[in-house]
Image (tube, rainbow, N blue to C red):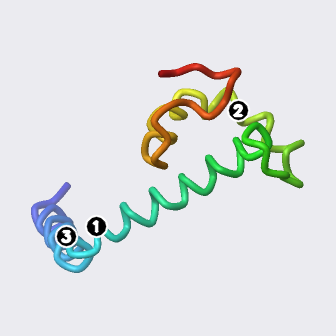
Amino acid sequence: MPGWRRRLAGVGRGLQDYYAGPYRSTFARARRDEEDLFMMMVFSDALGVPNPASYYTVELLPVVYERFHEWHRRMGMERSPLDSLSCC
């Protein structure tokens, strides 16, 4: 890659950091909130909340089991609310 392209790419990365840098925590919080809502939708049927999309979300249970412990701790539940899933 020629030198001018490398410098231009560096300037582009610098501008990206300059403009998006102050909003990183806001983006991370929004991403975490979306993930919390997604986990609630997937586990809602198991938690006793009616879920009209449970037929589609049941396929995702094995994928999100790994993150269940950190999710329920973040939601303020000291122990697992599911009898069938004992992670604590």
Q: Is residue 78 above or below residue 17?
A: above
Q: Which mark is residue 41?
A: none
Q: Is residue 78 left or right of residue 45?
A: left
Residue 73 in the image, given as x and y percentages of width and height: 44, 40
The residue shown at (63%, 31%) is: 63
Quadrant including the N terminus:
bottom left
Residue type, label 3: Asp
Which element type, helix, strand or loop, lies under badge 3? helix
Assess whether mark 2 and mark 1 are in contact (beta carbons under 8 angstroms).
no
Count residues near mark 3 (Cα–Cα under 10 Å), then give few for <14, some for 14-19, many for 20+: few
Give the residue at mark 3. 17
Residue type marked 2: Leu
Query: Image point 70% across, 41% down: which residue?
Result: 43
**Residue at the extreme front:** 78
Q: Nearer the viewer, residue 22 or 53?
A: 53
Q: Nearer the viewer, residue 35 or 24?
A: 35
Residue 47's spot in the image, x, y percent? 72, 41
Q: What residue sits right under mark 1 in the picture?
A: 24
How far separated are the C-alphas under marks 1 and 3? 9 Å
The answer to whether 53 is drawn above or below residue 85 in the figure is below
